[in-house]
Image (tube, rainbow, N blue to C red):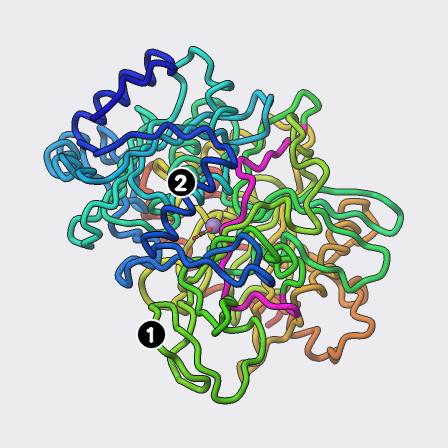
Amino acid sequence: MPETFPSLNPSLRAWLQAGAAHFRPENIVVCDGSEAERERIQSAMVGDGTLIPLDPQTQPRSFLYRTDPSDVARTEHLTFICSDDRDDAGPTNNWMSPAEARTRVWPLFEGAMRGRTMYVVPYLLGPVGSIYSRVGVQITDSPYVVLSLRIMTRMGRVALQHLGAGDDFVRGIHSLGDLHPDRRFILHFPAEAEIWSIGSGYGGNALLSKKCHALRIESARARREGWLAEHMLILGITSPARVTHYVAAAFPSACGKTNLAMLVPTLPGWTIDTVGDDICWMHPGADGRLWAINPECGMFGVAPGTGPKTNPNAVRALRHDVIYTNVALRRGGRPWWEGLSKLEHGEVLDDWRGSPWVTGKASPAAHPNARFTVPLQQCPTASGTFDAPEGVPISAILFGGRRARVAPLIYEARNWAHGVYVGATLVSETTAAATGDVGVPRQDPMAMVPFCGYNMGDYFAHWLKVGKSLPRAPRIFHVNWFRTDASGRYLWPGFGDNIRVLQWIFDRLSGKASGQETPIGVVPRQEELDVEGLDLSPDRLRELLAVDREAWSQETRRVGEFLRSFGDRLPSALRNEQAVQVKRLLLAASHLN
Ligand code: OXD
Ligand code: MN
């Protein structure tokens, strides 16, 4: 076994040596991020059948990987924050004491890598040379994870160079273990900047750079240091008058974030550039604005529903160098999922488990949470500012959920504190990105419930504090593309037509649109939204923008209960916002009577 990592810095070396002694791998590979290394790992996986090469003509250098059928989504019920004090994890997180972690979970790692290779994967989150970038090192026994991290992060030598002789790196330990859900744990130690994950080889459970590091660990650090680590896309929008604004937008998983990040505007003269599709770190700048970087450099996007109509830019990004997870396979080695294309009648595919599947079968061929992993630079709209060490200045923050009723297409918060209330009371219907029921409304503040590494009451207070420190804080909006009519049909066309909503945001920023005050914030006047060319009657538009006082009173009562669950950790400013909303709804109702 193990060499002694002669080329690594002493603190990294000591940590790796202690890890190797416990995990007992057969071999150790310190990854450098090179092409040769990628080819070596790929060929070994193709050789042992764990990676399936796709048709080299139509899908160059692309592969399919299948996870264990019990391991297909993030498992929030097995995800824990390990802080000394339970209250520091708060009511939205599972908590495990560090002592229990050591007695219950650490032994599962003992000898867990026997007969396997231990890969050491140094990675950099954020642009090279940026003061905002952070180093993580993940130990893993999954070569699929190594290949994925190589796409998702700046991996290898570049990270070690950034680290230098220092020991400020996030320590991530990952082993597939025996993949049994009873022995699956994803633990976070925010104070120590450490992550332990065992028993899963899937996405956010296993690519520790993503949700575990860039969100759970960094959100806790961001609080200490005065910045924000958020579950948000970053999008540049340029108007026909060549004015550019950057927006950051938080949506719960699988609510169209990737689609919005690279939309094809249906209004002439508008262009989009994509800076990020999932995670955003925002720092107060010397100019009083918030500056955002995308810590990642790849996308781990939900495949089903991604097609030439819904997201043509994503489809273009997938022409080569993709790792697919749990999609279906057409004969001839082409990937397929629901929403990608029409199949031939009677065509037989391999479903996501590798079993034969015939068109027309009721169960889906691809797993609903099947994914593509691809470099963001392959997206035709990838931003030229993507590698900018200082990031991009954010003009507006959007919160959005999937709501069949209640929430209008768009409204703007009255000010930052009200915007924090809007974010804190975000509700969305659940999707397949996490295990559990689909379509159930769930309270998901800032789309961060699964990803906030500390008590969300303190998180709200942190948001309020950051806003106070910003002379030029972004404006805050709430959007809902998913409102339906009484028969369940979507009222808004969505996708490329969302540019019409972004245009209204531009008009609010420039002062051109006055909007209309309602008890929940400012909604567009009907004539302020450009709906030319849409099949949208004035009645349907009115329904889309409607703020129903009865529905909102109920919603506000429910939200009040949720906010009370944070007890005395709930900032008084949010208690006030809640009281103001109740009062405004009452006044509006009595005024109507
Ligand atoms: C994701 C998620 O994978 O939010 O991005 O679940
Ligand atoms: Mn996400």
Residue lying at 31% horizontally and 63% vertically, measured from the top left? 436
Residue lying at 32% horizontally and 43% vertically, measured from the top left? 142
- The reply to whether residue 551 is visible in this rendering is no
- The C terminus is located in which quarter? bottom right
Residue 59: in magenta span: no
Please state which amino acid type lies under the numbered disc 2.
Val
Q: What's the mark number on residue 146?
A: 2
Q: How many marks?
A: 2
Dots 2, 1 in contact, CB < 8 A: no
- Where does the image place residue 496, in percent across and percent down from the top left? 71, 64
Label 2: how many residues lie within 10 Å, few (<14), some (14-19) or many (20+)? many
Residue lying at 27% horizontally and 43% vertically, measured from the top left? 186
Gap between marks 2 and 1 measured at Cα: 27 Å
* Region rendered in magenta: 289-310
Q: What's the mark number on residue 134?
A: none
- Where does the image place residue 85, in percent across and percent down from the top left? 23, 30
Residue lying at 46% horizontally and 61% vertically, measured from the top left? 428
- Where does the image place residue 485, in percent across and percent down from the top left? 58, 80
Residue 294: in magenta span: yes
Please state which amino acid type lies under the numbered disc 1.
Ser
